[in-house]
Amino acid sequence: MYVLCNDRLGKKIRVTCDQNDTVKDLKRLISAQTGTNAARIVLKKSNIVYKDHITLADYEIHDGMNLELYYM
């Protein structure tokens, strides 16, 4: 599956991942594409901040979903 991440500055990143990956794994994949440290990346949807240790399936993140990407 793939997930789209929008950083609100005009950069959209498409990341290929698996439903069993954790949010931390997704951040590492995003980090590899952007060059930003994975510890500085925050993923949100609406007002929900995704925690690192929970899987994408538990958050019901599915194929083609858009997430908001923020930098700390």
Image (tube, rainbow, N blue to C red):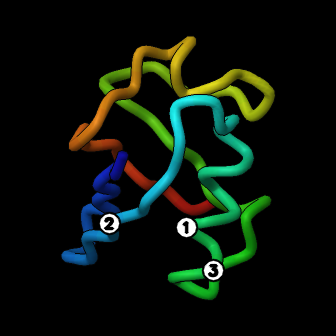
Give residue 27's quadrant in the image. bottom right
Image coordinates of residue 50 in percent, x first then y, are 58, 28
Left or right of 14 in this view: 72: right
Amino acid type shown at disc 1: Ile
Image coordinates of residue 54 in percent, x first then y, are 71, 22
Depicted 50 relative to depicted 34: above or below: above
Depicted 22 relative to depicted 30: above or below: above
Does the residue at mark 2 contact the one at mark 1 (Cβ under 8 Å)? no
Per the model, the C-alpha gap separating discs 2 and 3 is 12 Å
Per the model, the C-alpha gap separating discs 3 and 1 is 5 Å
Does the residue at mark 2 contact the one at mark 3 (Cβ under 8 Å)? no
Amino acid type shown at disc 3: Ala
The residue under the point 30% across, 24% down is 46
Q: How many marks?
A: 3
Left or right of 58 in this view: 63: left
Image coordinates of residue 67 in percent, x first then y, are 34, 43
Does the residue at mark 3 contact the one at mark 1 (Cβ under 8 Å)? yes
Mark 2 lies on a secondary structure that is: strand
In primary-sequence order, the first of circles 2 and 1 is 2
Mark 3 lies on a secondary structure that is: helix
Give residue 15's quadrant in the image. bottom left
Image coordinates of residue 26 in percent, x first then y, are 60, 51
Which residue is disc 1 drawn over?
Answer: 30
Per the model, the C-alpha gap separating discs 2 and 1 is 8 Å
Mark 1 lies on a secondary structure that is: helix
Q: Which mark is residue 32?
A: 3
Q: Which mark is residue 14?
A: 2
